[in-house]
Amino acid sequence: MPESEDTASDWSSDSPAPDPSPSASASTAVGASAGEPAPAPSKPSRKRMSRRRKITLIVVAAVIVVLAVASFVTAEAFSTNKSCNSCHEMNPYYNSWSTSVHNNTKCVQCHIPPGFPSFVKTKVLSLRELWVHTFGPPEPPLAVTRKIPNSNCLACHANPGDEKTATVTFPHSTHADVKCVDCHVRLVHRSVNPPYYMDPMTMSKCLSCHTGQSGAPPSNCSTCHTAPHEARGECSNCHNMSSFAQVSSK
């Protein structure tokens, strides 16, 4: 037992006592943290970063909304009939429209398919017209940006039915797969040529498709014609297909 007491006494007398001062504690803490990642930012720093993000997002969203509204308002302003006449190369089209049977119809009702996506698409494609107006020779007739779809015509003429004259019945139902403008081309803009307007109820117009050649639509006269007399067989037995003048009588 006395030997143990001597050993403890020797250790306490030879070893330096721990330094309880604050500087020693700080140096120990720094040494312990060496090589460790930096501490996370304080709560006030996070709040400032979050606030900046919110402000940036709000500003960007506001700019997008303002640009979208301005673009829509501008597009609407340039969708009126008068705006179509603001460029001199469109004057012949405006003048022919103003004297047509469609002069109570807005240009966009025929030339822009229904729906907002189609409206946006057409306005983007219309930039071509602005380019031609600025850099190209804007001489009529101009090529339209897109074909007029049947849906635009059917929006007003939902049930066209059959067209009839004394001896002809034209069934729209049998021409459902034909584009309306194929038969009614230049119905509105008749004075702007080519193409030239042809009355769809005339034989010259019918024969532009019904040519009698292989693969063409049926060309029998009886497809559309009703003879004003008793049955005498096929019309071509008496009538010439090119002139439709009576060549014999029976």
Image (cartoon, rainbow, N blue to C red):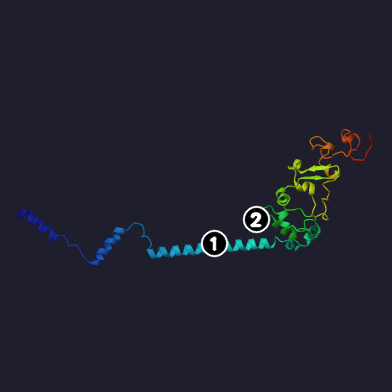
* Residue at 68% across, 63% down: 77
- Report x, y in % for residue 217: 79, 38
Could you tell whether 11 is left or right of 212 in the image? left
Going by the picture, which residue comes out furthest to the front?
Answer: 230
- Report x, y in % for residue 210: 82, 39
Could you tell whether 230 is left or right of 187 in the image? right
Q: Between 116 and 74, which is closer to the camera in this rendering?
A: 116
- Report x, y in % for residue 11: 13, 58
Mark 1 lies on residue: 61
Going by the picture, which residue comes out furthest to the bottom?
Answer: 22
Q: Which mark is residue 136?
A: none
Q: Residues within 10 Å of mark 2 (few under 14, many from 20)?
A: some
Q: Amino acid at mark 2?
A: Val
Q: Quadrant of residue 44?
A: bottom left
- Where does the C terminus fall, quadrant-wise? top right
Q: 13 above or below 146?
A: below
Q: 95 above or below 154?
A: below
Q: CA distance from mark 2 to mark 1?
A: 20 Å
* Residue at 59% across, 64% down: 66
Q: Which mark is residue 120?
A: 2
Q: 188 above or below 214?
A: below
Q: Between 184 and 232, which is closer to the camera in this rendering?
A: 232
- Report x, y in % for residue 211: 83, 39
The local secondary structure at tag 2 comes to helix
Earlier-in-chain disc, 2 versus 1: 1
* Residue at 10% across, 55% down: 7
Q: Residues within 10 Å of mark 1 (few under 14, many from 20)?
A: few
Q: Amino acid at mark 1?
A: Ala
The local secondary structure at tag 1 comes to helix
Q: Quadrant of residue 108?
A: bottom right
